[in-house]
Amino acid sequence: MIKLAILTCLFLAAFAAADKCHHKSKTYKTGQMFKDDCNLCFCGANGEVSCTKKFCHPPHAGYSGDVCHHKGQVYKVGEAFKDDCNRCFCGSNNVVGCTKMLCPQHVDYSDSGVCHHKGQVYKAGDSFKDDCNSCFCGVNGMVACTRMLCPPHGHVDYSDSGVCHHKGQVYKAGDSFSDECNKCFCGENGVVGCTKMACIQRGCLVNNKLYKQGETFMKDCNKCVCGARGEAVCTMKGCIHGQS
């Protein structure tokens, strides 16, 4: 009878202990989720704690969960900015993503409100003709033109010169329109001329990988979806290392 009582006590003690988790001098209930620095933890049914394993920035580094640091500057999550001729974006995971264009060196943009082209001056945003080519004056003072071989004057065939066809859309000659971040112009000869800037893709940048809006993906054992504002929304399960 005494042995049975001892065994019962040991069983109850073991059951009570398994109903809790101990982590860094604190006690948590089974099923409870809690934070450990920047990581998320979970108290399992067996009394074991499982946590995410992200690298947490030390407090003295001036780190904030809603900013990115880039070349000595601080930007908010979701903020777009320029780095020389490239465009950058502060992602929801505090990682900066930038285009990788080769920027011209020693260019003076002090008079960036105008463009100079073959002795003429144009305002930023102006569209104009250079022979049979269509040109556009960019906000950085640079001119972008189509590169068509122009026929000799007096022998131009304008058989379908009233409209332009571009990505399934029809535009009238002289129309200006946008193609993502680029500006386009419908020429009189039915040819579209566009600037050739590298556009920042709208989406979510997670672990240096870009996902489209509405796209679902896995992050460790959690399922995520890329939201309309470029923020990834994920489930918050505590993942055991190696679990997917």
Image (cartoon, rainbow, N blue to C red):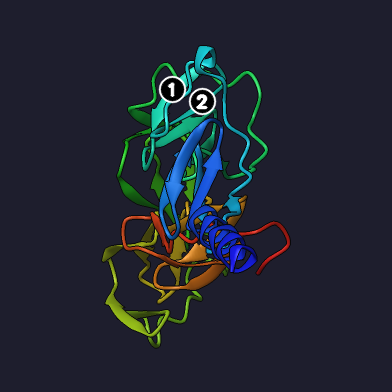
Q: Which mark is residue 197?
A: none
Answer whether residue 196 is visible to the viewer in this image: no
Q: Which residue is mark 2?
A: 69
Q: Which mark is residue 74?
A: 1
Q: Indicate the amino acid at tag 2.
A: His
Answer whether residue 73 is visible to the viewer in this image: yes
Q: Which quadrant does the C terminus fall into?
A: bottom right
- What residue is drawn where x is 48% and y is 34%? 26
Within the image, what quadrant is residue 78 found in?
top left
Seen as rendered, the residue at the extreme top is 60
Tell me: residue 118, above or below residue 173.
above
The earlier-in-sequence mark between 2 and 1 is 2
Q: Indicate the amino acid at tag 1.
A: Val
- What residue is drawn where x is 46% and y is 73%? 215
Count neighbours of disc 1 (C-alpha within 10 A) and say few if under 14, some if 14 to 19, many if 20 or more.
few
Seen as rendered, the residue at the extreme right is 242
Within the image, what quadrant is residue 107 found in?
top right
- What residue is drawn where x is 66% and y is 23%? 105
Tell me: residue 157, above or below residue 82.
below
Contact between labelled residues 1 and 2, with CB atoms less than 8 Å apart: yes
In the image, 203: left or right of 178?
right
Q: Position of residue 217 (x, y in %)?
A: 54, 70
Count neighbours of disc 2 (C-alpha within 10 A) and say few if under 14, some if 14 to 19, many if 20 or more.
some
Helix, strand or loop for disc 2: strand
- What residue is drawn where x is 53% and y is 53%? 17
Residues 173 and 87: in front is 87
